[in-house]
Image (cartoon, rainbow, N blue to C red):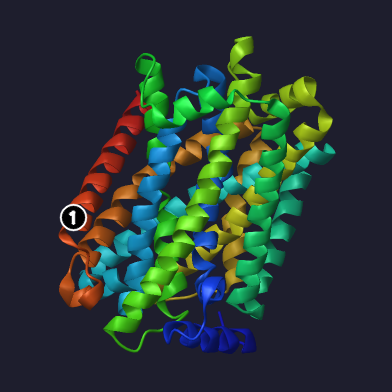
Amino acid sequence: MRDTGGREKTTISAEAALRGELKGIRKYLPFLGPAFIAAVAYIDPGNFATNITAGSTYGYLLLWVIAVSNLLAVLIQSLSAKLGIATGMNLPEVARERFPKGVSVFLWIQAELVIIATDLAEFIGAALGLYLLFGIPMLPAALITAVGSFVILELQRRGYRMLEAVIAGMLFIVVLAFAFQTFLARPDIGEVVQGIVTPRFDGVDSILLAAGILGATVMPHAIYLHSSLTQRRIVGRNEEEKKRIFRFEFIDIIIAMIIAGAINMSMLIIAAALFFKKGGVVEDLDVAFTQLGDTIGPVAALSFALGLLIAGLSSSSVGTMSGDVVMQGFINMRINLYLRRAITMIPPLAIIMSGVNATHALVLSQVILSFGIAFALIPLVMFTSNRRIMGGLVNHKLTTIAAWAVAIVVILLNLFLLYETVF
C-alpha cells in the first residue's frame, strides 16, 4: 500500500501518543486497525457452519470452546503483530531470510494453496449470502461477489486507514446483524453463562465437534497478514518505542478478538436457542436461513444472510491481501493484485458451476486449511522466541512455553480432524 496524507497524519498522531502527549482513548486510536483486518479471518463463512452445527446439536454446551479458541487467537495474533513491529519484516520475509531457498519456495506453494482454500470458503459464503438475500442464482451471485471484492481491494489505493475503516465498518454490520438475531432468539442467560464458564462434553461426537471449533480457530493467512500489517505501519526508532507500540497494538488485538468471539458465540447461541430444543440438527446454512425465517421472522433471516454476505466479502479481500504478502515474502515476487484476485476466483467459480453443495464445499475448504497450520505456527514461535531476531520484544519464557503448547495442540487437533474426515 502506498503512503498517503492519511498515513502521515496517523504517524504524527502515533508519535504524539508514544511521547505521552495524548491522553485517554485518543492515545490508542492511531494504533487501532490491523487486528480488525486480521479478525475477519475468524468470522469467515466456514465458521458459520461449524458454530450453527454445534449449537443445534448440543445447545450451549460448547460455548466454552469458542471462549478458549479466542484466547488462543489473542496469543497467536499478538506474536504475529510483535514480529512485524520488532523486525520491520513480515513472517514470510523473515522465513526467506532464515531458511534455505528450497524451504522458502515450498512454504510459498503451500501458503498459496491454503489461501486458495480460504478464498473458496469466503467466495462461496458471500455468493450464498446474495442467493439467500435476493434469490440470485449462485453463479451470477458469485460474479457479483467478485465485483464487490474488487471494489474493496481498490480501497488499498487510498491508503491503509481507509481500508481499515471500511473493514471495521463491515465487522460492525455483522455485529449488529447477530446482536439483532440473538435478541429475537431470547436465549436462556443462565445456560449461556454456564456454557461459557463450564468446560464439559457430551459423548465422543461433542469432542469431535469441539476439536473442529478449536482446530479451525487458527487461520494461517491471518498469521502471515498480521505481521505485514504492523511491519511498517508505525515504526519504532528504538527498543523502548517498539515495546510501547506493541502494548498499544495489543489493545487493538484484544478489542478485535472480543468482537470476533462475540460474533461466533452469537451464532452458536442462536442455533442453541432456536434449533436445539426442537431436536433438529442444522448443518446447512440455507436450512438455517429458512428456519430462522420460520421461527423468529423474515427480518432475522435476512440479517443472517446479510452477515454471511458481509463476512464473505470482507474476508475474501483479506485472503487476496494475504496472497500478495506470502508471494512477496517467501519468493520476493509480486503480481498485480487484481490479476491475483481474478486467478483466485477460478476455483470457487468452477465449484459453484459444478453444483456442489455450498456448505459441503465450505467444510472441504476447512480441511485444506488444516494442512497449512503447522507451516505458519512453527516458524512464528521459532522466530518470536529468538532474541537475535526480536531484540527486546523477544518472548518471555512463559510466553514461549504457552506458544509451543498452543501450536502443538492446534496442530494435533487439525491432524486428528484430517484423519476423521478422510477415514
Mark 1 crowdedness (10 Å alpha carbons): few <14, some 14-19, many ≥20:
few
Q: Is residue 365 left or right of residue 152?
A: left
Amino acid found under the numbered disc labelled 1: Leu
Query: If the image is split into quadrants, where does the N terminus sit?
Result: bottom right
Q: Nearer the viewer, residue 417 or 265?
A: 265
Q: Position of residue 336 (x, y in %)?
A: 57, 74
Q: x%, y% of residue 405? A: 22, 45
When asked about the image quadrant of residue 337, the answer is bottom right
Residue marked by disc 1: 398
The image quarter in which residue 378 lies:
bottom left
Residue 8, visible in the rendered structure: yes
Residue found at the far top of this picture:
279
User: 193 above or below 20?
Assistant: above
Q: Nearer the viewer, residue 181 or 337?
A: 181
User: Is residue 265 found left or right of 386 in the rendered image?
Assistant: right
Determine whether the residue tagged by mark 1 lies in a helix, strand or loop: helix
